[in-house]
Amino acid sequence: MIRIVYRRRRLSRPRYSSPDGPGEETVSSTGIDIYGGRDPRDIAFYAIREAALCLDVNPATLRSWALGRSYQVRSGEKKAEALLELPEPENPLLSFVNLMEAQFLRALRREHEFSMQHIRKALEALPSYHSQPHPLAFVDFLTDGIDLFVRKFGKLIDLNRPEQILIEKLLESHLRRIDRDATGPIRFFPVVVSDTERPISVDPRVAFGHPVVAGTRVRTEILSGRVAAGDTVEAVAEDLGLTKEQVEQAVAFEQRAKRKAA
């Protein structure tokens, strides 16, 4: 289950609209803007452990990306600086934007096995290519194209052309898990079983960022909870207007999260 904590942050980019029209889940029934004009993607939502479960990474790894870490060498203690810029440095909570940056890092580390030294070198130089904050989340692939971005990235960390081609394929797979609009990433699809399917989505405008069955507002934790309480998959699916497969995928997602948390 994803636990979400709400904090304040000033809007840093043009606001994006809701999936079902302007104001959906940003305006309460009383007409009050629940985000106070802020972009929900920038709000500190996700505790590190819950974000790690959603990304399917080790919580300790994500913590080091988000907060940095100290380690011992012969000459004493050294500090590896954080790779993510959190909304509120004093609070170890990630925003949706941070989630997308971490997903990018996960792809580089897990799929292509880049060293952290290479990644840190590239991240230090990326602002000279992309002036917008959070370049790993907001790099404009539609304008630059994957090939151009990879050539820039490859130049930063001295990749040869065959290695760059491998990264292009990696990025194509990475991008299939993220929906974007003109303002940047708006929706993320965690891996459940197959890397080609997208049964679960995370959208900061829907269910306050909790994982839901894709295309619905039904939270995965609710489905998993009902099945755990004794309801059959078929009964839950019928009650909520879902397919049996949708319920099974939601349960699989939550069970994977619980196993990693154990």
Image (cartoon, helix red, strand yellow):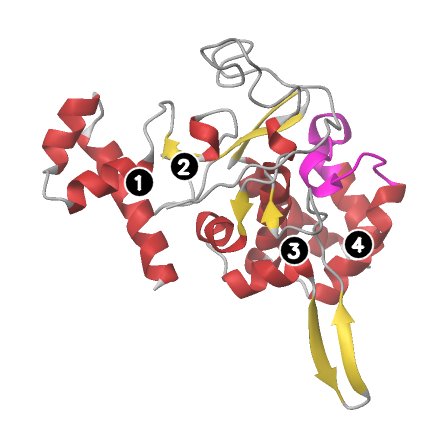
First along the sequence among labels 1 and 4:
4
Crowd rating for badge 1 (residues with CA inside 10 Å; few <14, some 14–19, many 20+):
some
The answer, for residue 198, to whether it is visible in the render is no
Quick check: marks 3 and 1 in contact, CB under 8 Å? no
Q: Is residue 139 magenta?
A: yes
What amino acid is at disc 1?
Answer: Glu
Q: Which residue is mark 1?
A: 221
Left or right, 250 with respect to 139, comes to: left
Residue type highlighted by circle 4: Ala
- Dot 4 falls on a residue whose secondary structure is helix
Q: Are marks 4 and 3 in contact (CB under 8 Å)?
A: no
| Residue 122 badge | 4
Against 235, is 20 above or below? above
Query: Magenta span covers which residues?
Result: 129-147
Q: Amino acid at mark 3?
A: Ala
Mark 1 or mark 4: which is in front? 1
